[in-house]
Image (tube, grey):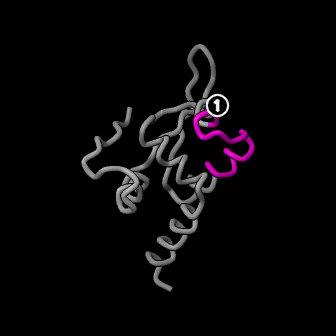
């Protein structure tokens, strides 16, 4: 099987979940959100969120950044591929402002 086709199928399998689609749309609207805040917004327990975040990271739709300031936290955001997928499935408007990388 073509590598591109195989990779695309993995992405489609990854987004075949209401929880993961919800996570992607939250990250689109609130880039660099902390894990615990993402869990609250998504309305799921942290253990389940960790699983879904892992699936999305494995296929390259989201990325994380560890920050250490007054307290330690991991922030999550969409990758360019994640934004592209949301637009492809019309889950966000194509004219939506692209998230900025810091």
Residue 45 covered by magenta stretch: yes
Q: Quick check: 5 above or below 87?
A: below
**43 or 80, nearer to the observer:** 43
Measuring 51% from the left and 76% from the top, which residue is drawn there? 6
Residue 37 covered by magenta stretch: no
Q: Quick check: 42 above or below 21?
A: above
Q: Main secondary structure of the magenta part?
A: helix
Q: Quadrant of residue 91?
A: bottom left
> Alpha-carbon neighbours of circle 1 within 10 Å: few (<14), some, or many (≥20)?
some
Q: Most extreme residue toward the bottom, as rendered?
A: 1
Residue under label 1: 36
**30 or 65, nearer to the observer:** 30
Measuring 41% from the left and 59% from the top, which residue is drawn there? 85
For the residue labelled by badge 1, is the local secondary structure a helix, a strand or a loop? helix
Q: Quick check: 48 above or below 5?
A: above
Q: Quick check: 89 above or below 50?
A: below
Measuring 69% from the left and 51% from the top, which residue is drawn there? 51
**64 or 97, nearer to the observer:** 97
Q: Quadrant of residue 39?
A: top right
Measuring 31% from the left and 50% from the top, which residue is drawn there? 93
Q: Most extreme residue toward the left, as rendered?
A: 95
Q: How many marks on residues?
A: 1
x, y percentage for residue 58? Answer: 58, 57
Q: Is residue 102 left or right of residue 49?
A: left
x, y percentage for residue 14? Answer: 57, 62
x, y percentage for residue 13? Answer: 57, 68
Q: Is residue 102 left or right of residue 77?
A: left
Split into 4 quadrants, where in the image is the C terminus? top left
Q: Which residues are magenta?
A: 39-53
**45 or 68, nearer to the observer:** 45
């Amino acid at each position: 099987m073509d590598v591109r086709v195989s990779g695309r199928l993995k992405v489609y399998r990854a987004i075949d979940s209401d929880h993961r689609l919800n996570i992607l749309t939250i990250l689109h609207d609130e880039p660099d959100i902390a894990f615990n805040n993402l869990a609250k917004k998504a309305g799921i327990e942290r253990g389940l969120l960790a699983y879904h975040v892992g699936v999305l990271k494995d296929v390259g739709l989201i990325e994380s950044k560890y920050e250490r300031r007054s307290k330690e936290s991991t922030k999550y955001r969409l990758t360019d591929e994640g934004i592209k997928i949301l637009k492809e499935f019309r889950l966000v408007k194509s004219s939506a402002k692209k998230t900025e990388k810091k």
